C-alpha cells in the first residue's frame, strides 16, 4: 500500500512538474513573440518619423517656392531659362523640333519637381 501511495505521489508530482514546465514554456514563447512585435513596431515608428520629416521638408520647400509673387516670378523665370537652355542644347545636338520641345519640358518638369 505504501508503495502504491508513493507511486501515486510520484506520478502526481511528475504531472505537476510537466504542467508547470509547459506553462513556463508557453509564457516564454509568448514573451518572445511580444518582444518581436514591439521591435517591429519600433521600426515602423522610426520609418514613420522619417516620412513625416521628409513631408515637412517638402511642404517648407513648396511654401518657399510659391508663397509670394516674387518667388513665383523667380521660379517661372528659372523654369523658362531651363526650358530654353535645354531646347538650345538639343538643337545643337541635332534634334527635331518635337525632340527639342520634349527635352525642354523634361528639364522644366525636373526643375519644378525638386
Image (cartoon, helix red, strand yellow):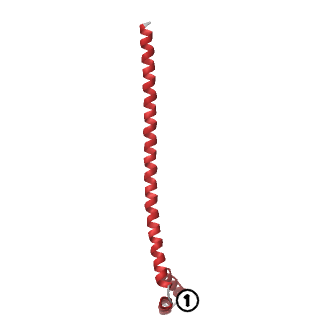
Residue 50, compared with residue 107, is above or below; it is: above
Q: For mark 1, give the secondary structure.
A: helix
- Mark 1, residue position: 101
Residue 114 in view, yes or no: no
Residue 31, compared with residue 66, is above or below; it is: above
Residue 114: x %, y % from top left: 47, 79
Residue 64, compared with residue 5, is above or below; it is: below
Q: Residues within 10 Å of mark 1 (few under 14, many from 20)?
A: some
Furthest toward the front, the residue is 68
Q: Residue at x 44, y 51 (%)?
A: 38
Number of callouts: 1
Residue 85, compared with residue 38, is above or below; it is: below
Q: Which quarter of the image is occupied by the N terminus?
A: top left
Residue 79: x %, y % from top left: 50, 89
Residue 101: x %, y % from top left: 55, 89
Pick whichever, 114 or 35, lies toward us.
Answer: 35
Residue 106 in view, yes or no: yes
Furthest toward the right, the residue is 98
Residue 37: x %, y % from top left: 46, 50
Q: Residue at x 44, y 49 (%)?
A: 36
Furthest toward the top, the residue is 1
Q: Residue at x 50, y 88 (%)?
A: 68
Amino acid at each position: 500500500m505504501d508503495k502504491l501511495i508513493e507511486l501515486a505521489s510520484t506520478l502526481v508530482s511528475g504531472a505537476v512538474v510537466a504542467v508547470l514546465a509547459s506553462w513556463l514554456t508557453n509564457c516564454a514563447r509568448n514573451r518572445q513573440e511580444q518582444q518581436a512585435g514591439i521591435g517591429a513596431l519600433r521600426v515602423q515608428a522610426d520609418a514613420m518619423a522619417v516620412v513625416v520629416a521628409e513631408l515637412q521638408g517638402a511642404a517648407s520647400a513648396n511654401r518657399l517656392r510659391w508663397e509670394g509673387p516674387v518667388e513665383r516670378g523667380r521660379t517661372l523665370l528659372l523654369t523658362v531659362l531651363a526650358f530654353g537652355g535645354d531646347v538650345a542644347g538639343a538643337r545643337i545636338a541635332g534634334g527635331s523640333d518635337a525632340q527639342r520641345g520634349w527635352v525642354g519640358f523634361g528639364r522644366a518638369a525636373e526643375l519644378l519637381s525638386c
